[in-house]
Image (spheres, grey):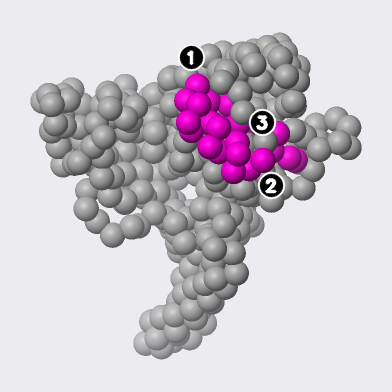
Amino acid sequence: MTSNPIRVGLVGAGYIATWHADAIRATSGVELAAICDRSAAAGQGMAAGYGVPYYASVAEMLKAGVCDAAHILTQPDLHKTLAIECLEGGLHVFSEKPFAANGKDARAMVEIAQDAGKVIGVGHNFLGLPAYSRLKAMYEKGSLGRVSSAEINWHLPLAPLRSGPFGLWLLRERRNLLLELGPHLFAFAHDLFGSVDILSVEVGHPVELAGNGGIRPQSWRILARAGNVEVTFNLSTVEVTDDRAVILRGSSGRARMDFASDTLVVAGENAFELVVNPLVRELSLAGQHLREGVVNAARQAASLNRKSPFGISFQRAMSGFYAGLRDGKPDDRFSGESAVRVIESIEAALDKLPEEP
């Protein structure tokens, strides 16, 4: 590619679009060029706020020739159609997760990108967190010893399950909740361990949606295996305190990466006598918690939360994707192939979903 900035159009002007827009503006060599949304109120409002043109359709945006790449930020069942339209129109594509509604669609999107000579990527944004980069480096270096188990958790209340709006895509079918939230968890497992084999799926805490909308589980427990690592995915949307973390247990240490707060805390044995070890270990953990908390507080105070962990995850995901685009070496964390692997694993889990009561 040339040294000119990569011009990006956002397809979809909902909540997540502002995070993408701000991350694009914080990424060197990339500029926000257009907003596209079939809702004039949403699209024009956002376009005016960012000082870029508005288009009512992808066709209009393509005809204007103002973009080199497009971010697909609509509801998931539209991702495939819109991504293909952009690819065949000559644009690179970066799709929000879930990349597609199923593995077949995901694979088709990647193949069409290859045929068009374009790059397609996915917004597995939490893989961009600094704390996760440190965790992955520790794992690959062997600092935790032989890792035998991993626990990947998403415990965060989801208000729409209880109070609506009940027409959201993630509530339309029972499988949609895992497709919507699962990529965050499965992306970690694939990036760390490679191929993941699903062993079993359990669901619980059923809730009945208003207006005969059906029953939806509020908790999922998925057991899997990746090579010699036993992997547990826990997803809960009941009223609990926020606990989103990746926990690795190895023969010489345990690491907990909190991806809601971008912190990494490591506990390991040391050379002291066994009686002293617990005290030294707890002092070490306390020091790590303090250090990580101070760093995050400084970030957020300095930038009105655009340097919050969520904001940083987007900025680093954009940086990784567009650096790979420029260099001709796609970052596998955010690649289309990575997206396919994640969606196929989620489909394998859905195949083991117990029948509805």
Q: Is residue 158 left or right of residue 130?
A: left
Q: Which mark is residue 118?
A: none
Locate residue 266, reporting x and y percent: 49, 68
Q: Is residue 171 left or right of residue 306?
A: left
Q: Which residues are magenta?
A: 30-51
- Amino acid of disc 2: Arg
- Residue at which label 3 appears: 53
Camera-side residue of 156 and 69: 69
Q: Is residue 275 above or below residue 173?
A: below
Locate residue 228, reporting x and y percent: 46, 43
Task: Give me the residue at 53% from left, 14% from top.
Answer: 81
* Distance CA(mark 1)–CA(mark 2): 33 Å
Q: Is residue 28 magenta?
A: no
Badge 2 element: helix
Task: Give me the residue at 35% from left, 43% from top.
Answer: 233
Task: Give me the residue at 41% from left, 55% from top.
Answer: 245
Badge 3 element: loop
Q: Quadrant of residue 67?
A: top right
Q: Nearer the viewer, mark 3 or mark 2?
A: 3
* Distance CA(mark 3)–CA(mark 2): 16 Å
- Amino acid of disc 1: Lys
Q: Which mark is residue 25?
A: 2
Mark 1 / mark 2, whichever is N-terminal: 2
Q: Nearer the viewer, mark 3 or mark 1?
A: 3
